[in-house]
Image (cartoon, rainbow, N blue to C red):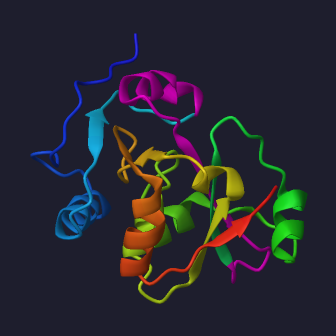
Amino acid sequence: MFFVSDIYTTAPSEFKSVLQEKTYHTLQNLHIPFERVDTDEAITMEDCVQINKKLNMKMVKTLFLCNRQQTAFYLFITAGDKPFKSKEFSNALGISRVSFAPSDLLEKMLGTKVGAATVFSALLDKDNVIQIVFDKDIICEEWYGCSDGTTTGYMKIKTAQIIHEFLLFVKHTPSIVEV
């Protein structure tokens, strides 16, 4: 059985990564409330079913994409149950076809491992190299469910606070696409 802890409204007592620590410190400094759970390692959207039930929200799917030359990078945030189609994404942005960025770049640029990509990686992207792209469906949701930068910590935050407070703080203007 997949373990999901009780719900907490405070940061973990110990941090597993630099990104996780920066995430909670930033939320605290911005006075953005959250609910969070600790879990067994969750890598796939199927792993997130119990997390969704516990936090009463839908986890987003966050994909790290790049062009063939690995010179343009995108963090695409979409619904967990929506299949990703590279052609539709590229057409919506008017760019060349993209593919999944290699795992070494995921770790280097986002500060996470596979399965933990998160909007909070924008905290590490000081030069705005990564373009954050939201599927239109996500911005219509009241709640935003995502990783805290680890594969064992997940949280629920108001979507409006992610878009209008967090992304403003990290100086990332998101693109919104319909795919």
Furthest residue to the bottom?
A: 127
Q: Residue at x 43, y 66 (%)?
A: 121
5 relative position to 178: left or right: left
Whole-percent x and y of residue 147? Answer: 41, 47
Whole-percent x and y of residue 141? Answer: 56, 46
Q: Residue at x 36, y 48 (%)?
A: 150
Q: Is residue 134 magenta?
A: no
Q: Is residue 100 above or below residue 152?
A: below
Whole-percent x and y of residue 20? Answer: 28, 57
Q: How many numbered circles does the render carry?
A: 0
Q: Is residue 64 magenta?
A: yes
Whole-percent x and y of residue 138? Answer: 61, 51
Q: Residue at x 37, y 24 (%)?
A: 54
Quarter of the figure that contains the C terminus? bottom right
Q: Quadrant of residue 97?
A: bottom right
- Image: magenta residue range: 45-72
Q: Is residue 155 above or below residue 128?
A: above
173 relative position to 73: left or right: left
Q: Is residue 111 visible?
A: no
Q: Quadrant of residue 129?
A: bottom right
